[in-house]
Image (cartoon, grey):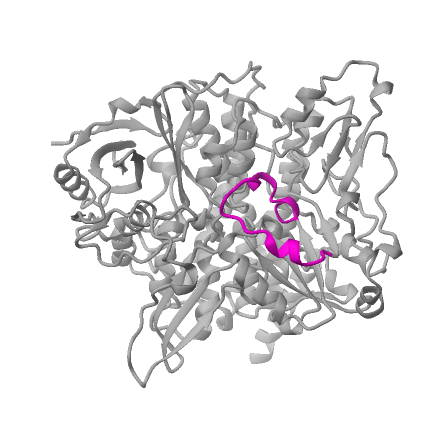
Amino acid sequence: MINAAKIKNNQRISVTDIPVLPYADFLEMNTALTKDIYFHCVNYFAWPQGHDIRLICCIADDTTGHIIVSSSLVVSDPSVKIPSFSAQQLAFHVFEREIHENTGLQYSDHPWLKPLRYPVDRSDLLSEISNYPFYQIESEELHEVGVGPIHAGIIEPGHFRFICNGEQILHLEIQLGFQHRNVEQQMLKLRTPLQKTILAEGIAGDTVVGHTTAFASLWESLCGFVPGEDMLHARTVASELERVAIHTGDLSAICTDIAYQLGSSVFGRLRTPVINTFQKWCGNRLAKSLIRPGRNQFPITPYVVDALNTLFDAYEPDLNEMYQRMKTLPSALARLERTGTVTQQQAEVIGAVGMSARTSGLIRDIRWTHPYLYYGQIPHQPIIKHHGDVYSRTQIRKQEINQSVKYIKSLIQKVPETSTVGELPAPIADSFVVSLTEGWRGEICHCGITDSQGKLVLYKIKDPSLHNWLALALAVRNNDISDFPICNKSFNLSYCGHDL
Amino acid sequence: MKLNISAASVFSDLRILYHQGKQYIPDVTTVEVPGIFRGRPVISKLDTIGEPIDLRTLEEICPTGAIKSNPVRIDLGRCVFCGECQHKFPSLINFTKDYKISAVRRDDLVIGEGQHQPMVIKPEQVRKEIRKIFKRSLKLRQVSAGGDNSTEWELNASGNVNFDIGRFGIDFVASPRHANGIVITGPITKNMAEPLQICYDAVPHPKIIILAGTDAISAGIHQGSDALDRSFLDNHTVDLYIPGNPVHPLAFINGVLKLIGRK
């Protein structure tokens, strides 16, 4: 029944080990698999090969920790339309929109093949960011509100188009692509592993550890290099510290958007010592330069252990005190509770990942289902919320902060000795690797393929925001438009991670 | 009873305030960055090192081609501050903790062999109206054009209770109509080229342009990407370059203060 390669997170296989199925079987198998909630698509992309397109689909099996990889070869012909996965499982919609936009592959029954990010090498150059086909409703009762691409604050660009009934949002459409830098192509063009690593650090500069860990693990695996215990350990500590830092900043931002000045200032200043600890550790507040494939550039020295312990001794009581205070304020809770709700069913249908999924009762956490680094040993237990509202997304941040602090404190009690390693070998020819990490937003997936010379020929990046922007659009329906900022902030999705 | 509750509330707020201690940095022009910081590099003179340096390797390890030799120099407008050159050639290159790394002229971002003195912005380099009009109040509009949200983050941090750039009359504002200039981050993507131009045009005269971060100054690691359109920079004069990956809040604050002649 299942004709596919079953691999583990970061396991290298030969490209030839991925079976090529007839499209009908490929479609049938993958859509049938994902009917089960414990199976979801982590990446589905096109690999152009001359006139043909090889479609590669990676389904995560949460029950066994495998990734089920299959493929199909289709002809690139604009007059031929093939049936879509999305018509059966909507969660595929975003992948098929990308495939269509990049290659021009036509679908007969995709619900809406609207543009995704206007990549520079898109198949239809007549489709431009200035003539995006917005959804429209003809009615004298309704009006539209357009916001962006440049927003009021210091924030990345994206356009939001609301259709409102009075003050109430009927529909929100999010148009992205302004940030497109063509990172996936640049990854192939850049020559040295260091260059590629620096590029990975900038996929989303607020998730440096998440994306760079995904890249470094993938690259090491392509090269057949086994990272030392100290490297895995340091990356685990960094991942959790990044989570603490951003979650703290987000709590501040949420308070800002409900005009709660004390919370905004206190959470805001509490982030400073956390990122300054990254500064002490590696010389960069956002952890750029900390992670390098093949080596542990900044080992966790007794000085770093001391800095982390000192940090948390002062940080945690102040964080808990401020959070407890906020919880007693009816004026704050009234803005958070039942605002911007995403139901569990919605989260399932759209394939939400990470925090967005976990606040709607859907267990999606790569640390738990596909453990990497030290997550198999911690052992990690995901925090789940059920209301799917802004308050759930506030609560989960606070609880994940406490959980991450606990993990770091325990991890740094025993730091593995720094391993001595030689030069990283060159990537092995004809290899395929999927690398999954759980960034603070959620599941990050990188896929890499090398050719017969061991040269990287395909690199695919998926930020959790790719799925979760739709969750925001659904969350704001029937909410007042004045609550849009707080809804947006409670998701805090990435523009550049989406646009690449 | 009601009075008691509100009194308790006031006390818990006061207790929180008390627990924060003093958070603001009294002097943002002299404070030291904690831990390691890769700021202004110092390059030793080759003839004083006493060991041979493989200049070809030196140039090649730099991921963005910021290092050139004969004489050895680093272009901070291209540098991503990864520290790889210092890691491989510790006797030659040393990144100091000096965060005052801004320049008005693009050429001044190039640090040469044996250049030990701090970077300065000379008054005659700055357009006259900048110091005359914006010295005590400068409102800025930020435009992220392909920025990775790291420099954007640090620009936000410049306004928090620690760094508090607002104390100098410098603020980020919501509308270009209220602004005296724009701060650009990111390598300027094709898809953002038009919105950037529209935003700039909406700022009333006289106005300034600040490039914040290596991505904005030279496209950084995105050099050579075909998804960029940097023609905006060919058609307009940049008033301040602030290197960094990302720009540290202290680098930003000190750069702007120097530009407007406050420090």
Percent coordinates x, y for residue A324 in the rendering = 53, 59
In the picture, measured across the screen, residue B32 lies left or right of residue B179, that is right
Residue A411: in magenta span: no
Name which quarter of the figure residue A431 lies in.
top left
**Near-viewer residue (A167 or B246):** B246
Percent coordinates x, y for residue A404 in the rendering = 50, 41
Q: Quick check: B136 above or below A468?
A: below
Q: Quick check: A242 above or below A326?
A: above
Q: Residue at x 86, y 35 (%)?
A: B116
Point out the image quarter for the N terminus of chain A: top left
Is residue A310 visible in the rendered structure shown here? no
Q: Tell me the magenta residue range.
A: B213-238
Is residue A2 visible in the rendered structure shown here? yes
Q: Residue at x 58, y 19 (%)?
A: A418
Q: Residue at x 79, y 41 (%)?
A: B98
Residue at far bottom of view: A140
Residue B222: in magenta span: yes
Name which quarter of the figure residue A416 lies in.
top right
In the picture, measured across the screen, residue B77 lies left or right of residue B122, that is left
Q: Quick check: A68 above or below A345?
A: above
Percent coordinates x, y for residue A493 in the rendering = 45, 54
Percent coordinates x, y for residue B263 in the rendering = 86, 56
